[in-house]
Amino acid sequence: MQRDRIIKILLLIASLMVMVVIGIVIGLNIKKDKKTYPEIVVPSELAWTFQPGYEAEIIDDNFWRFAEASYILVGEIPNVEFYKIAEGAPRNDYDVENFYIENGNEMYYHDETGTRLTTITIDVSEFQGDIDWQQVMDEGGVDMAIVRVGYRGYSGGTVNLDSMFYENVTEAKEAGLKVGVYFYSQAINYEEGLEEADFVLSNIAGLGIDGPVVIDTEDAFADDARTNGISIADRTDSVVAFCETVKEAGYTPMIYANRNWYAMSLDMSRLYNYKLWLAQYSNMPSFPYEYVGWQYTDTGYVYGVEGSVDMNVWFE
């Protein structure tokens, strides 16, 4: 009886000692691995997943993957702004590892067998000067050209024709290229978006345009730009007006913008049903919405074009 009591006491003491040792080991590891992380402001629905300190190190990678599934992140991690991806918007399923550069500066997308699934498109304006379109067709590796019709002045708001528009469209078509057009917008409301669409339609009538008709919406980067400070709603109204007018005329409307502009300056819940053309100068795009074209550089080179030219991966 006495012997059993002594054994029980010894076992209890041994258990307590083991627990103390385990506690010391865990404490030392926590102290050793604990790091200081910058404070990050996240949307409320994500806040529960992120805790500063040791726990943050454990979940860091998973947290950012989770965030990118629901938000476009603008900035460098961890100092980013979160912009909600529009619910119901079609997502692209491109595997970014399948984008490859060929022939020096031609980017293509391939399937798992290495088969090309895309073509090369260039977009041009009067700034490219005289273009040898036959050489572009024969040696440039280009299948389509998107030609600027015109632009709206960022300060005065006047609508202007690109000085090389008719020459570029006519010669590109004669060379055998597919041709689309774009308009550089600085519209501030629905009415001006409609005006820009009417201007484009009147100038492309009878030219046999078989590519998309695009509204180019972007920052003017000028202190006196009329579009500075307009609301997201007004800017989106102007894009909707342009696209709907183009669609009613029997053409394929498309929106061109850079990644952050789509996230920060447009209401994508109203726009994702239109075809999208992404501008993002990087080796791999990081954009959740389904897009038809990716402008991956503005310093490309193509036979027949003097100087640099915008180049695009095209999925149609």
Image (cartoon, rainbow, N blue to C red):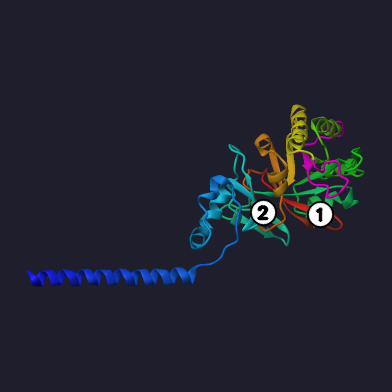
> Does residue 33 lie above or below 195 as drawn?
below
Q: Which residue is mark 2?
A: 108
Instruction: Examine the image and state in which quarter residue 26 appears.
Output: bottom left
Task: Give the foreground label among 2 and 1.
Answer: 1
Mark 2–mark 1 distance (CA, rounded to whole Å): 17 Å
Give percent across and percent down for residue 309.
Answer: 81, 54
In the image, is residue 191 part of the stretch drawn in magenta? no
Assign the C terminus to one quadrant of the image: top right
> Does residue 6 lie above or below 153 as drawn?
below
Q: Magenta stretch: give its range.
A: 201-229
Q: Amino acid at mark 1?
A: Val
Which of the two labelled residues, at mark 2 and mark 1, occupies the earlier sequence position? 2
Left or right for 180, reference 273? right
Left or right for 118, reference 256? left
Give percent across and percent down for residue 61.
Answer: 53, 58
Give percent across and percent down for residue 45.
Answer: 54, 45
**Viewer-side residue, 239 vs 214:** 239
Q: Which mark is residue 309?
A: 1
Instruction: Identify the residue at horizontal 65%, vertical 53% (top origin).
Output: 285
**Label 2 SS:** strand
